Image (spheres, coloured by chain):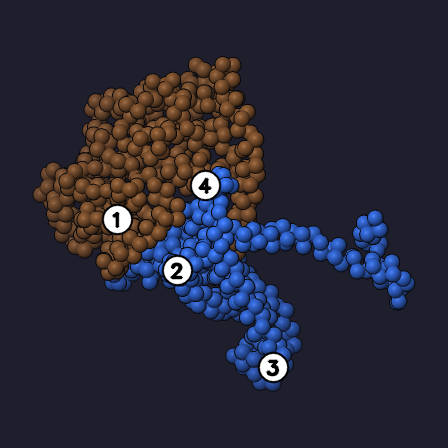
Chain colours: A brown, B blue
Amino acid sequence: MKRVLVRSVAAAAATVLVGVLAACSSGSSAAPATQGATTGATAKDTGPLKVWVMGDVGPAFEKATADFTAQTGITLQVDAIPWENVNDKLTTAVASGQGPDVVQVGLSLLPTFAAAGALKDLSGVIGNYPGLAAANFPDAVDPKNLGSDGKVLSVPWISDTRVLFYRSDILTAAGYPTPPTTWDQMEQVAKALKARGDGQYGYYIPLWDNTLPVQYTWQAGGDVVGADGKVNFDTPEFAAAVDHYLGFFADGSAPTASDWDQTQGFVSGATPMVISGPYLAKAISEAAPELDGKWSVALSPKDKNGTSLFAGSNLGVWNTSTHVDAAMQLIDYLDQPATQTAWYQAQGELPTNLQALDELSKTGDAALAVYAKQLTEARTVPMVPGWDLIANEMATALTAIGTTGADRDSTLEAFYAKAAQISSNY
Amino acid sequence: MTSTSTVAPPGAAFPRVRRPRRPAGPVSRRRGAVVPYAFVAPAFLLLLAFGVLPILVAAVVSTTNMNISGLADSSNIRFIGAANYTRLVQDPEFWHALTNTGLFALVGVPSILVVSLGVALLLHRSDSGFARALRAFYFMPAITAIVAVALVWGYLYNSQFGLFNYLLSLVGIGPVPWLSSPTVAKFSVALVAIWRATGLNIIIFLAALQGIPKEYLEAAAIDGANERQRTLRITIPLLRFAIFFVTITTVINWLQFFDEPYVLTQGGPVGATTSISLYIFQQGFRYNQFGFASAGSLVLFVIIAVVTLVQLRLRRSDVD
């Protein structure tokens, strides 16, 4: 425990020192860096490219890129960074200036690292790669929707969205052979399922999920970012989202336990409905293969519309990279429909390339067709710096109201003030 | 030149300085003054480099708006004076975290003291193989990795399939929201920390108990003191220094309480288990607000320094 203080102080000290050093060196090295990139293009740059990917995908990534190295002669050094260390790792890289060449950045971290100037503007070179044109990808991840003032700081790679997972056997037994498609139906079905008995619920809302209320705000026809680009929660649509969200806690159709296990609850049937991403499908099949055929996925239930969350990761080129051309070739390769399809088959991570998505959704996999359809009606989290902090404040405020009986209006007022204050700090 | 040559053979320098009753001249007197410093120097330099310097840097950083863009480009760093500190005292979460830390310390320090002293007294009564095995048993939590500990306790506490709630259901008691209720979660998290911390303190008390001369207890027994009187009047007063040591280190540990809430609850639900260290960590490393977090860590440093000084002061008057 004592070490934590010492460690954090030491880390702060180190980051300052390194930051000063990096600032000193970046000025002098800027010119040779760009020069290296241009000469590299003519003299055939073969890397090695340092690539940082996230999660447990190292060997799979090396396998997926073996062909790329064979074709281009560009060698790769792949580092797979565990998800929980991503923020630390990227922060250290920013501080030290020692980044990779190609980096995977989750969409929720994108604004922070774009604002820190960690990613290179690719608008000058992206035109050479027709495969990377914005038209090949969903609108949600079009650079102009990622808030970078005309710059292209990243290119879409893998996608992820939130759909409704439901236990068809339990819903049918309760008299609902088809899944709910509207908010009203959702509330009604959840309540009916809750009435099955003690310890049974209708719908699991992860208390740590700080995107669901935002998704509900979109579905109510609103947004959490105002026309001025600043976050604004004080809207009738957010209020409607909050009422829908809290309603599940108020009538007891969602469990209030903060340590509720999503997969376990779904498998046991205690929470037969949950809004989650494709990774849950994998978790369910692994935990309970015998449930196959007793559960399914459906589009997010609608209010005014059925907008869901567009999650996933983009690829960027680190600001200090001297292998821009080789890096772009790799990104171009990773975004080709064939590579994207193979990656889905190996890793279960959805493509962003529209052609790959389309081909996959025609393979007869019903769940895939739902994901692909939902991705066309999905948006990314707001691309404002400090979003993480604001979203967690929102989750905390709603948890307080929903599970500990805090006063709705005063808690929300305090949250609005806090959100405005956080925005002004950036 | 001269000073380095005195330092070089320390073994030779010592007896030469000590032997003459009266210092022969200014040279050897200077040697006598240098040698102790030479021995202290490495530790002192380490303390400067890894203790004092980081605190000074944190003090400087705490007056800036240091965040991730400041790391990337130092021209983004601005001096903002005491703004981080004003923001800190205006942040209800900071006060919440501070209150939580105070509560944790209030519950945790006496519990650890009483439990570890009690267990040590019991273990000290016997020197059988079983008692020695028990010592190892009690020490086990102290050497087990916190993540493994948290994982297992997380399963014990779990509201869906946890062992505790299952056992309670056997005797007809309804489920307890171990980690979900803001009030109960505080105690659940504190319990794990108490369980983890007692092992080391039991060993400290056992060592101190072994240092108590048997004659005192025998003399008291001959004078007709019963076991309770011997423990309360002889043993515990003679353990005063060990108790003092354990109290100081335990108080500091609770003020820096971090590991258990970090891995068990992430500070939730609704911030109920967010200690001040966890709050600082989140502000710094989760939200990249290094300047603000530095201000928080400096405040924590001052609190710990003041609390420890007060304890040392009380101890001094106790000795007098």
**Seen in the image, is B238 located left or right of residue A134?**
right
Q: Position of residue B275 (x, y in %)?
A: 42, 58
- Mark positioned earlier in the residue sequence (3 or 2): 2
Secondary structure state at the residue bearing disc 1? loop
- Kindly identify which residue carries mark 1: A233
What amino acid is labelled 3 in the image? Ala
- Position of residue A170 relative to residue B134, above or below, is above
What amino acid is labelled 2 in the image? Gln
- Kindly identify which residue carries mark 2: B90
Secondary structure state at the residue bearing disc 4? helix
Marks 3/4: CA–CA distance: 70 Å
Marks 4/1: CA–CA distance: 26 Å
**Seen in the image, is A225 located left or right of residue A236?**
right
Labels 4 & 2 near each other (Cβ < 8 A): no
- Residue that sits furthest to the bottom in the current view: B223
The chain to which mark 1 is attached is A
What amino acid is labelled 1 in the image? Phe
The chain to which mark 4 is attached is B
Q: Position of residue A163 (x, y in %)?
A: 22, 37
Residue drawn where x is 44% and y is 68% of the image: B106
The chain to which mark 2 is attached is B
* Mark 4 on the same chain as mark 1: no
* Mark 3 on the same chain as mark 4: yes
Marks 2/1: CA–CA distance: 22 Å
* Mark 3 on the same chain as mark 1: no
Q: Residues within 10 Å of mark 4 (few under 14, many from 20)?
A: many
* Mark 3 on the same chain as mark 2: yes
- Kindly identify which residue carries mark 4: B69
- Position of residue A150 relative to residue A188, above or below, is above
Label number found at residue A348 = none
* Mark 4 on the same chain as mark 2: yes
- Kindly identify which residue carries mark 3: B220
